[in-house]
Amino acid sequence: MLIEAELKARVHHVNRVLGLLRGRASAEETATYHDVYYDTPAGGLERDGRELRVRVVETAAGARCLLTYKQPAVDAASGSKPEHEITTVDAGAAATLEVILRALGVAPVLAFTKQCRNFRITSGGREMLATVATVPEIAGTWLEVETLAEPDELTEALDAVRAALAELDIAEADLTGALYTDAVRATRNNA
């Protein structure tokens, strides 16, 4: 079982962080994520700290669809969760997945779009994905850095992610456990 060891931070100097990432990564991928989160009618997945998401990723190279299930967090401070994911290059699979998921008793509860710039980097001997993200409904720019880890190496993996963030001039004080889903809901509820 792999765990997504991930930390997220608010970015105050976007151009500086992008410059540092471009200096470390071999390529930059600009992508639009269309996320739809599913839950039971009683909200059991979210209540238990689990997530079920269908994501369509659009890039210049085309589109792909990902079905992701995240178990409850195994590290409270970072929110890192065991993650199970299936990817298909058929972006139209999202409609098929919705039919299947509804038939299994879950339904869409939240959908939003995220604009991303993805960079593959290495830090502490670990391959990582660094994503500079904005969500049109939420003020601010975010940096997510993640790597996959076995359960017994989660602490080491999170230390490597922290080191990568420090190398990108992200201060520990800028780290956040805030979720996009919560922020989007709050924005919509206040509208």
Image (tube, rainbow, N blue to C red):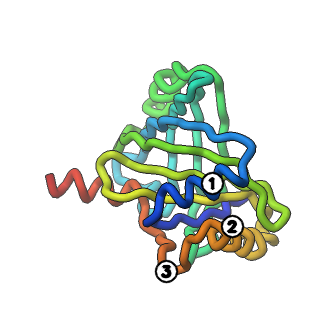
Tell me residue 89's x, y (percent): 64, 23
Lower sequence index among marks 2 and 3: 2
Q: Which residue is mark 1?
A: 130
Disc 2, disc 1: CB below 8 Å?
yes
Q: Is residue 98 left or right of residue 6?
A: left
The residue carrying pointer 1 sits among few (fewer than 14), some (14 to 19) or many (20 or more) residues within 10 Å by Cα, namely many
Please name whichever residue, 40 or 1, is drawn nearer the observer in this view of the structure.
1
Q: Which mark is residue 13?
A: none
Please name whichever residue, 142 or 177, is drawn nearer the observer in this view of the structure.
142
Q: Is residue 47 left or right of residue 149?
A: left
Tell me if residue 6 comes above or below residue 106 in the rendering: below
Which residue is the extreme one toward the left? 191
Tell me if residue 170 comes above or below residue 182 in the rendering: below
Tell me residue 150's x, y (percent): 79, 63
Q: Write the residue at 38% across / 54% down.
A: 181
Where, quadrant-wise, is the N terminus in this rendering?
bottom right
Tell me if residue 95 comes above or below residue 76 in the rendering: above
Amino acid marked by disc 2: Ala
Q: Write the residue at 65% across / 42% down.
A: 85
Tell me residue 137's x, y (percent): 29, 48
Secondary element type, mark 3: helix
Instruction: Find the distance from the CA under tag 2 to the CA under tag 1.
Output: 9 Å
Amino acid marked by disc 3: Ala
Instruction: Find the distance from the CA under tag 2 to the CA under tag 3.
Output: 15 Å
Residue 104 in view here? no
Disc 1, disc 3: CB below 8 Å?
no
Q: Which residue is mark 3?
A: 173
Please name whichever residue, 181 or 50, is drawn nearer the observer in this view of the structure.
181
Q: Which residue is mark 2?
A: 164
